[in-house]
Image (cartoon, rainbow, N blue to C red):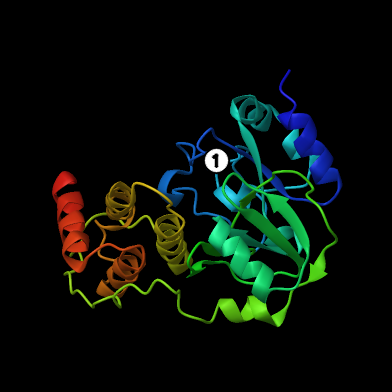
Amino acid sequence: MNSIPTTALGLAEQGLPVLPLRADKRPFGNCRACEDLACGGRPNMATPGPCVCPWPCHGWAAATTDPTVLASPQWAAAWRRARAIGYHPGGAGVTVVDLDNTAAVAWARENLPPTATVATTRGEHWIYRGAMRSVNGVRAGVDLKSTMSYARWLGPGTGALAELPEAVRALAEKAPAAVRPAPRAVTVPAPTGGGQCRHRTPAYLERGIAMAEQRITEATSAIHATVYRTFLAVLSTHGRCGCLTEAHIARLFTAAQAKGESPRHCTVAWANASAALGM
């Protein structure tokens, strides 16, 4: 018997916003109605909960504590396919310091105050009471997961929750230890458009670009493919009406370069995506 739905409901009853995760530990992708934010996204992406779509298809933003939603036919179908439980730390008022290896764990023991700790496959999650912005790669093997992010539920762990220390907040302001070359400005002409505009409000385009940046930033593997697919999705949704600007493109290129992509690869991926759409 699949115990995941039962466990998830119990966590939700304790105030933890949960969502189903696939076998690759990632959330379920958008349904067809919501693909590439065709649904317009949620009115306020800074808080957990689904858009009007009944499926759990908006990543961290779909996380919920509502038992009616969790037991709905759409969510029940997703739970049957789920292989793990995710949760939105920021929605629960906590921050997860994700320590990805033994070296990162050793660093935390030397530099951070003790708190609730959960063992992971390769390292540990240190959980503090208090929310903050999420940042990946604040130093080698260390990610911060809180608002606009999700973490995998791996059990209650050991120890008591400590208050979020300034030492953790300061990590978000520091450059990663493994310094990559600074993103280089690359000018790519924005599509001239001419097609019908699907943007109901300026916020529709802004949400689309923000979600695309997030998709690239949160990628943990297949970075090349993720960047290309994201560029393709953005151009497919926003590239034909003339609303997409060079500033929007620069934001996507900056996100890709922060994941280690070269300016040349960004340009090639954008050109290939444009060609694939006949633009």
Q: Is residue 68 visible?
A: no
Task: Please name whichever residue, 245 or 243, is drawn nearer the observer in this view of the structure.
Answer: 245
- At 54% from the left and 55% from the top, the residue drawn is 101
Q: Position of residue 151 (x, y in %)?
A: 63, 51
Relative to residue 252, is residue 107 drawn left or right? right
Q: Amino acid at mark 1?
A: Lys
Q: Quadrant of residue 149?
A: bottom right
Task: Please name whichever residue, 62 or 161, is drawn nearer the observer in this view of the structure.
Answer: 161
Relative to residue 217, is residue 18 drawn left or right? right
Residue 87, placed above or below residue 179: above
The residue under label 1 is 25
Q: Position of residue 221 (x, y in %)?
A: 39, 48
**How many numbered circles are shown?**
1
Q: Is residue 223 visible?
A: yes
- At 73% from the left and 61% from the top, the residue drawn is 127
- At 41% from the left and 62% from the top, the residue drawn is 213
Determine crowd level at label 1: few under 14, some 14-19, many 20+ residues with C-alpha closer than 10 A: some
Task: Please name whichever residue, 107 or 74, is drawn nearer the observer in this view of the structure.
Answer: 107
Q: Looking at the image, which residue sits at the far top? A: 1
Q: Position of residue 1 (x, y in %)?
A: 73, 17
Task: Please name whichever residue, 67 or 126, is drawn nearer the observer in this view of the structure.
Answer: 126
Q: What kind of element bears circle 1?
A: loop
- At 29% from the left and 75% from the top, the residue drawn is 181
Residue 94, placed above or below residue 80: below
Q: Position of residue 3 (x, y in %)?
A: 75, 26
